[in-house]
Image (cartoon, rainbow, N blue to C red):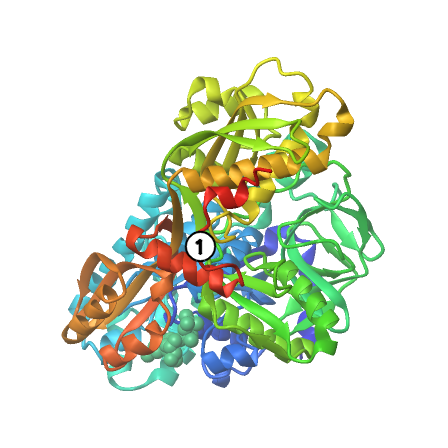
Amino acid sequence: KRKKIAERVTTLMDKPQFIRNIGIVAHIDHGKTTLSDNLLGGAGMISMDLAGKQLFMDFDPLEQARGITIDAANVSMVHEVDGKEYLINMIDTPGHVDFGGDVTRAMRAVDGAVVVVDAVEGAMPQTETVLRQALKEGVRPVLFVNKVDRMINELKVEKKDMAARLGKVIDNVNKLILGMDEEKYKAGWKLDAAKGNIAFGSALYNWAISVPQMKKTGIGFDQVVDYCHEGKMKELAEKVPLYIAVNDMVVKFLPSPIEAQKERVGVIWHGDWDSPVGKAMASCDPNGPVAFMINKVKVDPHAGEVATGRLFSGTLRRGMELYVSGFGGTNRIQQTGVVMGAERVEVEEIPAGNIAAVTGLRDAIVGSTISSEENMTPFEQIKHVSEPVMTVAVEAKNTRDLPKVVEVLRQIAKEDPTLQVTINEETGEHLMAGMGELHLDVTVTRLQRDRGVELKTSPPIVVYRESIAGHAGPVEGKSPNHHNRFYIEFEPLEEGVIQSLKEGKISMKMEEIERRKLLIENGMDKDEARNISGYYGTNILLNMTKGIQYLRETMELILEGFEEALKNGPICREPVQGIKAKIMDVKLHEDAVHRGPAQVIPAVRQAVQAGILMADPVLLEPFQNVYIQVPQDQMGGAMSEIQGRRGVILNMDSQGDMVILKSKMPVAQMFGFSGAIRSATEGRALWSTEFAGFEPLPANLLLETVKQIRTRKGLKPEMPKPSDYLKVV
Ligand code: GDP
């Protein structure tokens, strides 16, 4: 049966006006998986009786066991509207914000999104997060209001109140869209039941209606309420099957690649529109140059790296040599295919407008641009909303597995760009940093299960940042031969500049004039903005000197010393952020032999290390927003759990007899939260988290925390002094 579907899929692949690339997004538990099953059932991929029970998209047993969807999986299916067949490529997206990076990556590949909202709960924090990610990528939403059966049977909402109740859910989603993108809202992206871009139904019982469906079938809210009261769910599902209402809506209201690419390419690509590749993408031209954006890489034990992504122009075929951005060379395509759940079905060629899975792109990583043109401007980087905030040390259980573990960690970093794998140089251990406890836990479990390695991990630890709150300097850095001296001042970098660096808006590659303008706009002094020598992370090095001989040719080494000091900061070897270092004076030996790397790098490194310790050093700790949904009478328990962990309540909202608490908490205080909130609320609380940035650690906790981190890293426990770094000989 799957074979047959594959045939129909391939015949539709080269008719982009009949293609829809979509994602389903939702707050956890609102029914995304159950809805996906309905669509697969409708397409004949699973038995309809199993829809809602089989959880096809969650084919990973680990996900099944946890009851959450972690990895975006893709499925292609065929749907008929008014006698015409359409190809719907659906990308599954994770329902847990700890894996928020996956949602962003999936949105890059699609043009439309079905937003699922629980009729009883209404829009929830993650509804907002996923909707924002969709709109940012130029992805158009339609709405599915799910669990209408619960509204009728459990909440006992009466016929006359149905429209008003559902209207409230819709209004809230519309408010979110309006707040995020007024222009699009006014241009027709507003959700409107009368227009037909909203469907209402029950994914669990496989039925749904929309205004166009009501007109066709004569079944409206009144009839639905009657069927529900009489418990005739099966009959209702036969009269108004969910997959028809939803797929019709997808076909009618979400754009085809031809329509979407005209607009979307401008959002995700900033190259020349008049170039051959620009024109080909705007018109989704299968005969143009290849422009393929990778949004997922998975290492398959048999086929090697399978790279999945969206083909914006050109046609992919076996044997093609394509350029991989950031790598500087070409890779040869081995196989081309489409993904159907756990299976990859091989096809001869894949034309523009489709989601393709190919093997052979060994040097591609998530976010790579693959092109037949050597100099194609790459797609915009995929922006992740989160930063890694937790680390585990990973070791091989058996030392003979060590080379394999190193290899497996390299692969996983390629597959999941939100993971950072580094090596602790003191201890030689591998450190894996991720977006939360669950993210790391799932990654380690998977590595053991899928890659046949046995791992030992340390308990997770929080990732800190080092920074400064005051001024220092000039600090003198002396080279070992005493012939070169650097005088550097330190102060905190402007907040706006830090933000722009984080967002990748400022770089050394951009025009000097434009960079200067941006820096000044973000609060930097005019004189300083003109003297940028380089940056590292969110730290900037300025050269405030004039006319010093040999300085220009030495600058590269100076920057190296700067980086070495910041990569592993002087306080406790955590990364440094938000430093402005100003070179005020320099003395260099006139003979190049005496101002080489072995002289310059340590001199600068030591000055920066000592300077940070002299400029009121601080540690920054990561925070998470924590959203908790809890019944009124259990609210007290949840509140004291937040407050006992240095948490702050940001907002409180009630919906029926539930309260939604928005709070903010240091990640360091989140350990064991899961169990604690469960017992504090008799298991009645639902909660989720979201990265909320770094903030200074309270001064009274600084010394103790520094001691803990240093001890753990095998360093001497006391807070170091500037003189520990300035090795005056
Ligand atoms: P996801 O986290 O968004 O993927 O949500 P799931 O599809 O896993 O659904 C979460 C829970 O809600 C499961 O227990 C489903 O059986 C249940 N559920 C999903 N859709 C409906 C519905 O329409 N009506 C009712 N009563 N329950 C539903």
Closer to us: 353 or 122: 122
Image position, residue 695 (x, y; %): 35, 49
Residue 608 position, x and y percent, is: 52, 37
Q: Quarter of the image for the N terminus: give it.
A: bottom right
Say few, some or many: other residues with alpha carbon within 10 Å of mark 1 (under 14 / 14 to 19 / 20 or more): many
- Which residue sits at x=42%, y=60%? 707
Can you tell me which quadrant of the image ligand 1 is in? bottom left
Horizontal arrangement in the rendering, residue 95 relative to residue 299 (left or right): left
Q: Is residue 524 above or below residue 262?
A: above
Residue 101, x across and y down, in percent: 51, 57
Residue furthest to the right in view is 319
* Residue 266 visible in the snapshot: no
Where, by quadrant of the figure, is residue 412 drawn? bottom right
Looking at the rendering, which quadrant does residue 597 occupy?
top right
Residue 361's place in the image compared with 510, above or below, is: below
Q: Ligand 1 near label 1 (Cβ, under 8 Å)?
A: no
Q: From the image, which quarter does the C terminus lie in?
A: top right
Q: Viewed as shown, does residue 728 lie left or right of 623?
A: right
Q: Secondary structure at mark 1?
A: loop
- Return the residue found at the far front: 729
Circle 1 sits on which residue?
Answer: 464
Viewer-proximal residue, 146 or 629?
629
- Hey, what amino acid is under mark 1? Tyr
The answer to whether residue 119 is above or below residue 259 is below
Q: Residue furthest top?
A: 547
Instruction: Tell me, yes or no, if residue 18 can be seen here.
Output: yes
Q: How many marks?
A: 1
Q: What residue is drawn where x is 59% and y is 70%? A: 394
Q: Which residue is nearer to you in this view: 43 or 176?
A: 176
